[in-house]
């Protein structure tokens, strides 16, 4: 199974990531697309986790992983037996609330827990990183897209590797990672000296961004817009890339309004 690469987070205090995740509310959803894009910045949700105690168990496990740096193995070891005891595991016949039909659905599984862990941890760290970079944007106004660049890196993400744009470029409204399920990309903040030392060029997304409709649900045929970038990759080759459907937004930028009463005294200092 893929592992989230959090090596870049070494030296980054996780408090902002912790605060971001703690500020979230809850949202019930039968299908993942029912909680759309920036709404994920305000609410924790897991598709087909329709009981609050199940959603709370999943959320608490992610929060513990953020708070204590637990691994996926520890996360899974503690959570799997708890979910099995409560009946949220494996394939089951359940009434689809939107159609009233009985359908076979996948509830808990090792793969789903891995996805829940990776997606929430990676998003929280990227949001924490975003807020730290915004605080220091006057000193480091240039942002560089960094893909992992290994055999598991998606071509669309590899095409954006080393791309440098100003922090306020509209590109980051749609392409700030994660840009898909279990995306491992990140962003690095640079100053003018960094650009010279690394021979990096700052570009603009002006005239290079557009939208196209992509299918969200095979069941309903629902379509939704995704942002498209047309430009050149780091080798000068023409590319047309887009985030996965449902990921054309910046999770660190949208409507994060934490409630100070939900924080420990030490975390309140960060608000």
Image: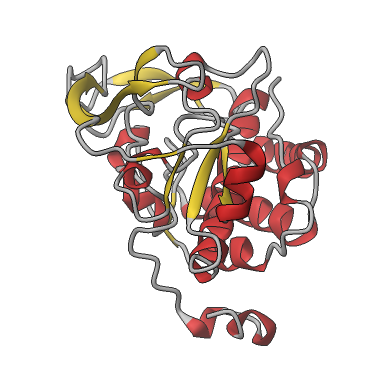
Residue at 54% in and 28% down: 161
| 70 lies above or below 48 | below
Res. 86 image quadrant: top right
Q: Which quarter of the rendering shows the N terminus?
A: top right
Q: Is residue 88 visible?
A: no
- Residue 176 in the image: x percent, y percent? 44, 43
Report whether 44 appears left or right of 124: left
Res. 231 image quadrant: top left
In this orientation, which residue lies closer to the viewer: 164 or 88? 164
Res. 35 image quadrant: top left
- Residue 250 in the image: x percent, y percent? 39, 48
In this orientation, which residue lies closer to the viewer: 10 or 47? 10
* Circle count: 0
| 151 lies above or below 7 | above
| 4 lies above or below 70 | above
Report whether 126 appears left or right of 13: left
Report whether 162 appears left or right of 93: right
- Residue 44 in the image: x percent, y percent? 46, 52
Q: Is residue 104 visible?
A: yes
- Residue 47 in the image: x percent, y percent? 42, 36
In this orientation, which residue lies closer to the viewer: 131 or 84? 131
Residue at 18% in and 23% down: 212
């Amino acid at each position: 199974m893929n592992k989230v690469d959090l090596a870049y987070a070494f030296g980054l205090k996780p408090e902002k990531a912790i605060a971001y995740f703690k500020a979230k509310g809850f949202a019930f959803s039968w299908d993942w697309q029912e909680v759309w894009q920036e709404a994920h910045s305000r609410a924790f949700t897991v598709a087909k986790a329709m009981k609050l105690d199940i959603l709370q168990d999943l959320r608490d496990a992610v929060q513990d992983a953020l708070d204590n740096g637990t691994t996926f193995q520890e996360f899974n070891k503690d959570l799997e037996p708890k979910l099995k005891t409560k009946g949220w595991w494996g394939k089951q016949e359940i009434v689809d609330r939107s159609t009233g039909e009985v359908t076979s659905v996948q509830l808990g599984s090792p793969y789903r827990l891995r996805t829940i862990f990776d997606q929430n941890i990676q998003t929280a760290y990227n949001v924490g990183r975003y807020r730290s970079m915004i605080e220091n944007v006057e000193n480091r106004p240039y942002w560089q897209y960094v893909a992992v660049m290994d055999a598991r890196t998606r071509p669309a993400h590899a095409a954006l590797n080393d791309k440098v744009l100003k922090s306020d470029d509209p590109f980051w409204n749609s392409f700030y990672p994660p840009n898909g399920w279990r995306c491992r990309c990140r962003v690095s903040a640079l100053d003018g000296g960094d650009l010279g030392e690394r021979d990096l060029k700052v570009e603009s997304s002006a005239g290079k961004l557009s939208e196209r409709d992509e299918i969200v649900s095979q069941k309903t045929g629902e379509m939704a817009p995704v942002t498209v970038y047309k430009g050149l990759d780091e080798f000068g080759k023409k590319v047309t890339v887009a985030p996965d459907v449902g990921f054309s937004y910046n999770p660190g930028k949208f409507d994060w309004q934490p409630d100070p009463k939900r924080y420990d005294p030490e975390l309140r200092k960060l608000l």
